[in-house]
Amino acid sequence: MQASEQLVNQGRAPLPGGQDGMANEGADTVSAAEAKRPALPVVKTGADLLCSLLVEAGVDVIFGYPGGAVLPVYDALFSAPIRHILTRHEQGAVHAAQGYARVTGRPGIVLATSGPGATNLVTGIADAYMDSTPLIVLTGQVATASIGTDAFQEADIVGITTPITKHNYQVRHIEDLPQIVADAFHIATTGRPGPVLIDLPKDVTGGPAARVGLPDPSPLGYRVPTGPDEAAVDAMAAAIAGARRPLLYIGGGIVSSGAAERLRAFARQTRIPVASTLMGLGAFPNDDPLFVGMLGMHGKYAANQAITHCDLLIAFGVRFDDRVTGKLERFSPHSRKIHVDIDQAELGKNVAVEIAVAADVSLAIEALAKRELQPDTAEWIAQINGWHADWPLDAKRGASVLKPQTVIDLLAELTGRAAIVTTDVGQHQMWTALFYPWRAPRQLVTSGGLGTMGYGFPAALGAQVALPDRTVVCVAGDASFQMNIQELQTVMENDLPVKVAIINNGFLGMVRQWQQFFYDKRYAHSRISSPDFVKVAEAFGALGLRARTPQEAEQVIRQALSYDGPVVMDFVVEEEENVFPMVPAGKGTDEMLLDWEEA
Amino acid sequence: MERTMSVLVNDRPGVLARIAGLFSRRGFNIASITVGSSERAECSRMTIVTSGDDRTARQIEAQLLKLIDVLEVEDISAERIVSRELALIKVDTTRETRLEISHILEPFRVAIVDVAHSSITVEVTGDTEKVDALIGLLRPFGVTQIARTGVTAMVRSQTV
Ligand SMILES: Cc1ncc(C[n+]2csc(CCOP(=O)(O)OP(=O)(O)O)c2C)c(N)n1
Ligand SMILES: [Mg+2]
């Protein structure tokens, strides 16, 4: 099983990120900052050493919240050349770090105190683990002598986060810190990225230390697959050459491996249509005629038909998530399947595949491109275009009531399709995914695997910190926004001109939709009231705007985009609008509901 | 199908918890797990007896390898292996049963490690079947306590 793997324990891998597309525009600023790396801080304590190592690792910003057990670290940060963003809740800090990581590809850094500070991070850590987002999570811990005594603010955060981190550490001795920091960055950012937590007892950070440089990473037992071997490339090439109805099924792995450019060239060269998961959106431009659309529970009609009827499914950087596959027995029943993923454990986990390749998907595409494959896909593309014509997505503009889809449509148009967009979780997330025409990887920042309400706004904050010159829009739900609304103060304090667009339907819309379809319209506790969001914005010192019609929506968006500061837009939309298509739970991808009458 | 996996891990605090957690979280079954030092100073070897079809076994292997502290995983079920466990068994005895019990014990090559007025404790080593068999034979006399180590195993070397 290890034959194709290489033990990676020598040489520091470069931090990934910003390889393709629009993220580059912002990433330039990041690499510029990296070029003139600040002088290392004076080291007297363990905490000073930590800061020195972080600076060496390229850290420019930490999202955090202080408390007793991290006081030594905060004391070191007082004079360290690292920016610190004080959020108003630790959950805000971790989601902000996720936003930072998702738009740059560089690890987001989070710092919190022991006990409640650390446990407040748990949702974000789980979210980052599911969506393969690189994070370095630093938590304070009670002094080593008190560990295990139920001391004040003690929580076993290493135990709690073991199943939701790629790896975690507790630093028992200061001598171990340099290697742990080096390994943590290496593990978080290579292979399938993910969160790594370092728990820091107060006596270790508060105790004496001398400067040690950042060593090379050497995590014993950590392996990362590299390119595919020749036999695997041969097998994939033969399958592709012989296919009549091949479909590329792409996901977040394309984004994290920086393979978007190669994928584009490969799809165009082979004329194989491309369908994407939620996490893959942007990796292939939506306006390319080969783009079939998003797959899955709320995927496009044509995409779900295509995955049902293809004869070769080429799964690149995906994990056959249940939101994509629907009922497994009905999933893509006529296809042979190729699966390339850097995480060996994903191969064959949910769906048996004929050709399973543990490899960096970018290198796999590069190797396949050299084979100059030309399957005959003309008829297949015509069939897909027929499905597009049968059930196109319709933004339903022009109505006098404001439709949520219209808001997304207007946002896309008025941001020139170039905004960084974050979302919360619910109907508005699906409308954003479906209606915003994605152009570049790392343009959409959304909680896919965990589906965390309250993710969008702090993620937007973090994205804006990383890319200060980009337009960052958070499409929020009226309910989701209330989960981390406190971060309004953080954006004000740090002059982060994030634009929040609340799709205000007065409901936990996605919950209500399920209740409408499957619980006989018994809307148990899915009606939700909200404060006056315009007044809330104003109370924080942000600009608050409201729109109830398409005309007002257009004006409001224009005004928000030209305003130099944070804006909260309250879009009062049609309350009981539903997201279509919809594959009900337990159904096959071809058993989509297309409108309410059918449901 | 029963599977035996030999797993080389970094000898660090918390490794056993990571592995046990992975099995329970992903619904893999553990029949037994043993840990002890290995041929490498900084590493321990675990022998895990589990069950599942080929796909499950591959998933267990891949999930184990994903843990940073796991260095090697070998599914040795299909190999010629030596597998052993040790058990301590405490049996009630009376003047009448003592002789009969010692007849039963003879072919098992056990060590009698403790003798008291009304009980003896025997130590048996062997594969799981042998230990099961002995326990089965002793039960009618009144087995009051059993402590088994669980299986540890190794692939046999090629003889020729
Ligand atoms: C933290 C969390 N709690 C509960 C849920 C379950 N859930 C999924 S969507 C949803 C409703 C979201 O409402 P809103 O933010 O207003 O979005 P809408 O669906 O109305 O667009 C809920 C409660 C969740 N995803 N996350
Ligand atoms: Mg809502």
Image (spheres, coloured by chain):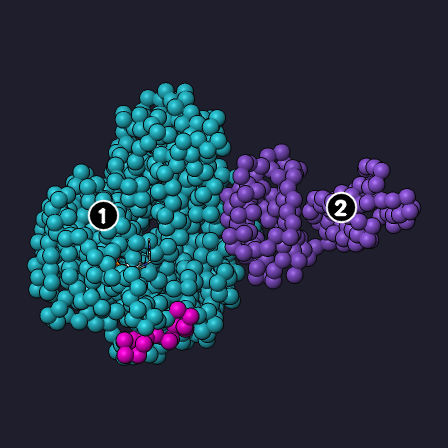
Report crowding for label 1: few under 14, some 14 to 19, many 20 or more residues within 10 A (C-alpha): some
Q: Quadrant of the N terminus of chain B?
A: bottom right
- Residue A485: which disc? 1
Question: Which stretch is magenta?
Answer: A585-599
Q: Which residue is mark 2?
A: B144
Q: In terms of secondary structure, where does tag 1 sit?
A: helix
Residue A283 appears in view: yes
What residue appears at the point 18 percent right and 67 percent down from the top-left corner? A574
What residue appears at the point 21 percent right and 61 percent down from the top-left corner? A506
Q: Amino acid at mark 2?
A: Thr
Q: Pointer 1 indicates a residue of which chain?
A: A
Which sits in the foreground, B81 or A241?
Answer: B81
Chain letter for the part of the structure drawn in purple? B
A587 is within the stretch colored magenta? yes
Q: In the drawing, does residue A211 fall left or right of residue A474?
A: right
The x, y position of residue B12, in whole percent, is 55, 36
Q: Colour of chain A?
A: cyan
Contact (Cβ within 8 Å) of mark 2 with mark 1:
no
The x, y position of residue A282, in whole percent, is 29, 59
Q: Pointer 2 indicates a residue of which chain?
A: B
Q: In terms of secondary structure, where does tag 2 sit?
A: strand
Q: Is residue A146 above or below residue A329?
A: above
Residue A117 location, quadrant: top left
The x, y position of residue A94, in whole percent, is 32, 43
The chief SS type of the magenta part is: loop
What residue appears at the point 87 percent right and 44 percent down from the top-left corner? B94
Which sits in the foreground, B110 or A594?
Answer: B110
